[in-house]
Amino acid sequence: MFNKFSKTNVLTMLPIATALLLACGGIANANPTDDPVDLSKTEDLFSQPIKPNPLTTDPSTVMIRVNGEDITRGEINEVMKQTMQQMAGRVPPEKLQQMQAKMYDNIKEQLITKKLMDAAIAKANVVVTDEDVTNALNEVRASVPPGKTLEEALAASGTTIEKLTANIKEQLKTRKFLESKVEGISDATEAEAKEFYDSNPDKFKKPETVTASHILIKFEDTDTDETKAAKKAKLEKIRADIISGTNTFEEAATKYSDCPSKARGGSLGTFKKGQMVPEFEVAAFSQEKGEIGDIIETQFGYHIIKVTDHQEEGTVSFEDAKDQIITYLTGQKKQEAVTAYIKSLRDAATIEVVTE
């Protein structure tokens, strides 16, 4: 199985087409609501040279030569900068600094692979149609937040629609080429899926979870005891109106809550233990479904909570997990085939380290 076209990779415009586009997705689902990093507001963490050569930091310096094709310091540093910007806001700055040396070496290896893949794709004369590119571009355009155009989003990231289109075409060619390398690989069987399920019981445990919404009247640093008392009284009135039916919880959250979740009627989605501050967690996990809870106080302010679902800890059945396991194992087989193919390209290549 293959991943859909990656919108995030395209929008951040890493100048490297990933060579491993096969879906090897894990058993646990990734969070689909992670907000993308706004590169226009990201601190420049590349202000210092990354692993500089003691003799030169000239971006035109040839670092590696792959079958006669040069990889320069500037190419490596550009990808490095883009990667650092992508990770800023998700990884603490001090950890980013610690990761730089390993990241630098990984990017060099990725660029070697890209050179080899580009040559193989060109030799195979892989063709993608204008319709393919247009469809992928429309997917990216549909992912842009409301109130912003694709062109504005690209400008904020320092790129253009022309560069985006070229990047899309390159990635589509890579995907199509790799698909041709795994055409003969059969899907994993139900027996293989059952063996994986039985051998990995920890992967199929379900934690206790709660689905809840809240209304927050937040504290300010300047709040006095009197101010806090007034805020609590305000929330008590809101709670009473909800219970009496004067207002729904969702309407009240949209109108009165100080939390960004007000845009979703106060919804916090589903969470497990350890994800919320203790006072909030205790209230949410002990509250009955549909109940409008008593006012609780946390470091953020006063809250009322509405629990809409509560799932106990358990184990995902094989029947429920079977299809996902088969997809995962099939992806593993294809990934192994692609990895072996790339290794064959590297084994046959002449790769020369020109500058350390």
Image (tube, helix red, strand yellow):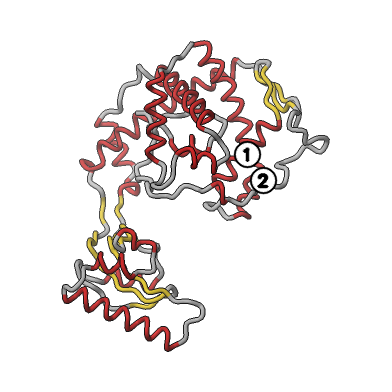
Point 35% across, 17% down: residue: 184
Q: What x and y, as percent, mark residue 98?
A: 64, 50
Labelled pair 1, 2 in contact (Cβ < 8 Å): yes
Comparing 91 with 149, the one in front is: 149
Find the residue positioned furthest to the bottom.
226
To which residue does mark 2 refer? 46
The answer to whether residue 221 is left or right of residue 64 is left
Amino acid carrying label 2: it is Phe
Comparing 335 with 149, the one in front is: 149
Q: What x and y, as percent, mark residue 226?
A: 42, 88
Label 1 CA crowd tier, 10 Å (few <14, some 14–19, many 20+): many
Name the image quarter holding the N terminus: top left
Please give the count of numbered marks on the rendered protein: 2
Amino acid carrying label 1: it is Met
268 to 234, vertically: above or below: above
To which residue does mark 1 refer? 80
Q: What x and y, as percent, mark residue 9?
A: 49, 36
Q: Quadrant of residue 101?
A: top right
CA gap, disc 1 and disc 2? 8 Å
Label 2, secondary structure: give it: loop
Find the residue positioned furthest to the left.
245
Label 2 CA crowd tier, 10 Å (few <14, some 14–19, many 20+): some
Q: Quadrant of residue 108?
A: top right
343 to 270, vertically: above or below: above
Q: What x and y, as percent, mark residue 86?
A: 54, 44
